[in-house]
Amino acid sequence: MTCACAVLRDISHCRFPILLPLQEWGCPNEEKYFEYMMSYCPMHNVQEGVKYPAMLLTGGLHDPRVQYWEPAKFAAVLRHNQ
């Protein structure tokens, strides 16, 4: 199971055990929870050939929630699949 979504990647490797929202989300190391989480991961739900509307994707150098490369990766996926 590989994932480009930072949240799934982080909690599946248990790098932040205090912050694990396992009761709310489930454990991504279990197949059914992993598939459920991936179903709403925007990076993995971009459809090829679909023309998406203009979007403002933001991130910051010092933002602990959304690092600057995450919007850049999402923009690259959108561009590649259009």
Image: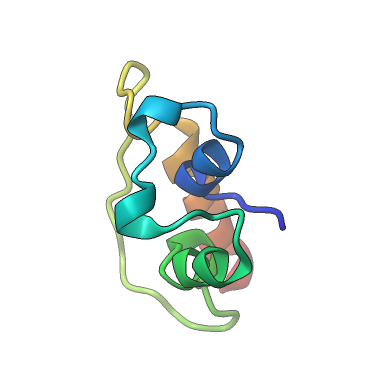
Question: Residue 79 falls in which quadrant of the image?
Answer: bottom right
Q: Residue furthest front?
A: 23
Left or right side of 22 for 5: right
Q: Which of 70 and 37 is in front in this view?
A: 37
Residue 3 placement (x, y as % from top left): 63, 53
Q: Which residue is drawn at 44% across and 79% down?
A: 51
Q: Nearer the viewer, residue 72 or 35?
A: 35
Residue 50 placement (x, y as % from top left): 49, 83
Q: Residue at x 37, y 27 (%)?
A: 18
Q: Quadrant of the C terminus?
A: bottom right
Q: Which residue lies furthest to the bottom in this view?
A: 49
Q: Which residue is drawn at 50% across and 40% down?
A: 11
Left or right side of 56 for 78: right
Question: Residue 19 falls in which quadrant of the image?
Answer: top left
Rendered position, 58 above or below 5: above
Q: Which residue is drawn at 55% across and 72% down?
A: 32
Left or right side of 64 for 2: right
Q: Quadrant of the N terminus?
A: bottom right
Residue 30 placement (x, y as % from top left): 60, 61
Q: Residue furthest top?
A: 62
Q: Nearer the viewer, residue 66 or 20?
A: 20
What color scheme is it? rainbow
Total labels: the figure holds: 0
Rendered position, 42 above or below 69: below
Rendered position, 30 above or below 48: above
Rendered position, 8 above or below 59: below
